Amino acid sequence: MEKSLKRMATMQRLQTTGLSLFYEKGYYNTSVDDILKRLSLSKGAFYYHYESKEDFFIQIIENLVVRKVYSLLIEPIEGHEHTLDLITNCFENALETAVHNELDYGFVLNNFINEFNGRNELVMKHLNEVLKVWEVTLVSAIQRGKFNGHIDRHIDAEGVAIFLMSSFMGIRTLMVETAPSARKYRFMSQLRFYFKSIEPKQTSQYNQ
Amino acid sequence: MEKSLKRMATMQRLQTTGLSLFYEKGYYNTSVDDILKRLSLSKGAFYYHYESKEDFFIQIIENLVVRKVYSLLIEPIEGHEHTLDLITNCFENALETAVHNELDYGFVLNNFINEFNGRNELVMKHLNEVLKVWEVTLVSAIQRGKFNGHIDRHIDAEGVAIFLMSSFMGIRTLMVETAPSARKYRFMSQLRFYFKSIEPKQTSQYNQ
DNA sequence: AGTGAAACCGACTAAGGAGTCGGGAAAATA
DNA sequence: TATTTTCCCGACTCCTTAGTCGGTTTCACT
């Protein structure tokens, strides 16, 4: 017999509320009681379903963060159209949700990596795995682009991937406080310049 | 009578040790006692010199972080040579310290912004001020570059600045766990591509 | 040496945290 | 209906933390 529906419903409520608070206030700065209070649940309920706060958090990553990152940042670039257009649209959409202050899972990842780095190896392992999948997806999308002639053949796919991930995570940090919409616009505009520079050039071969 | 030397020495010791621990473990995850223990000092000493943990932290930002960010990220690009070269070298150097796992103040800034965002307005005010100075410096450097013909006149200086800040903060996050040296190399290589794309278009007398 | 201020000590308080546990209610099963 | 299983309650323990405070040491200056 599968997991009881009631059990799953409670676990789900705990996780979504937990993620929302962890994102808002940080993991170490959010107590289990904070989450419980918001749901009018008790300590007993929490520890009936989860071994510990850490276990709880890891399940949140696996169940919520990973899946959202997949659907927002990974699946959209797995198509077979023009690679750079796919990535452009993907970033555009992801940043748009950020502008509206929704829970933005790309940034959730960035936040948590910063918070747990050097502090919790186990959690970092899970977060790094998500990053790795993102990276691999980008790399193969770029290689597809090279193959299809949308990207210069001399370009280092790995390098482009790193650069894209960097700039995305960075802009999310910068969008947090100041003029998110304007910054998003400027960022996307510069991203297009960058993409232009890695498109095939008929005349030159000064790449490496 | 000038501020007692002893007082200043103790405050300095507290601040450098404090920053080092805050950077390593995070602000909320580092107790005042942690810092005191490392210096074999007592609670009394700490609260004799500082009003609160928050006050202490803000003084660290003002005294250590701000000055280091200036000397590492701001002053180096205030020169009058080729703008994009200045920025390239500046990033190169800043990332090199990161590779060697030294206390990297550019990243300190990134870390703290992530940690305090939405949680402590006062601290964020101070951190944002540092960011703002960095941004302004970048913008005027880029405008100088446009004026000197090193950068295309149609480029949005503000956009370039945002893009640079983003990518720098992002790569620092990515360098934390995985292959920092390789990632730095790839990042710098892509940065040069990007710079190429914002140089003046026509192969004129300027760029060759 | 004597004195007052500056610098520091460390036990203490109050608050809040994670995790425990005996028990009770609700739902499933017999 | 009776009984077992699932789910949840909330008081409790033990621990850590920021901040306090009365007291002691160190230092500068006479």
Image: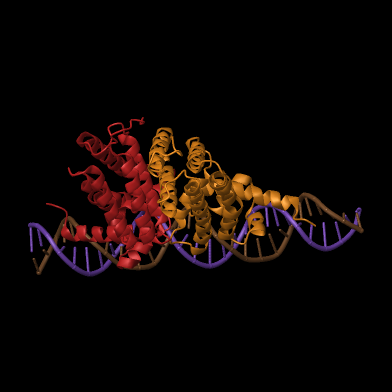
Chain colours: A red, B orange, C purple, D brown
For the C terminus of chain A, the quadrant is top left
Query: Is A32 situated left or right of B144 in this image?
Result: left
Can I make out residue B127 in this image? yes
Query: Is A200 situated left or right of B96 in this image?
Result: left
Q: Is residue A155 above or below residue A28?
A: above
Query: Is A142 situated left or right of B50 in this image?
Result: left
Q: Which residue lies at the image location 32% right of the left edge and 35% below the top edge?
A: A158
Q: Quadrant of residue C27?
A: bottom left
Q: Is residue D21 above or below residue A174?
A: below
Which one is in front, B156 or B168? Answer: B156
Residue A145 image offset from top left, x and y in percent: 23, 38
**Number of numbered markers:** 0
Residue pushed farthest front? B205
Residue B93 image offset from top left, x and y in percent: 51, 38
Q: Which residue lies at the image location 48% right of the left edge and 40% below the top edge?
A: B88
Residue A164 image offset from top left, x and y in percent: 34, 44
Which one is in front, B93 or D9? Answer: B93
Q: Is residue B198 above or below residue A205?
A: below
Which one is in front, B56 or A88? Answer: A88
Residue B61 image offset from top left, x and y in percent: 57, 54
Can I make out residue B29 in this image? no
Q: Which residue lies at the image location 42% right of the left edge and 55% below the top edge?
A: A174
Query: Is A89 situated left or right of A24 in this image?
Result: left
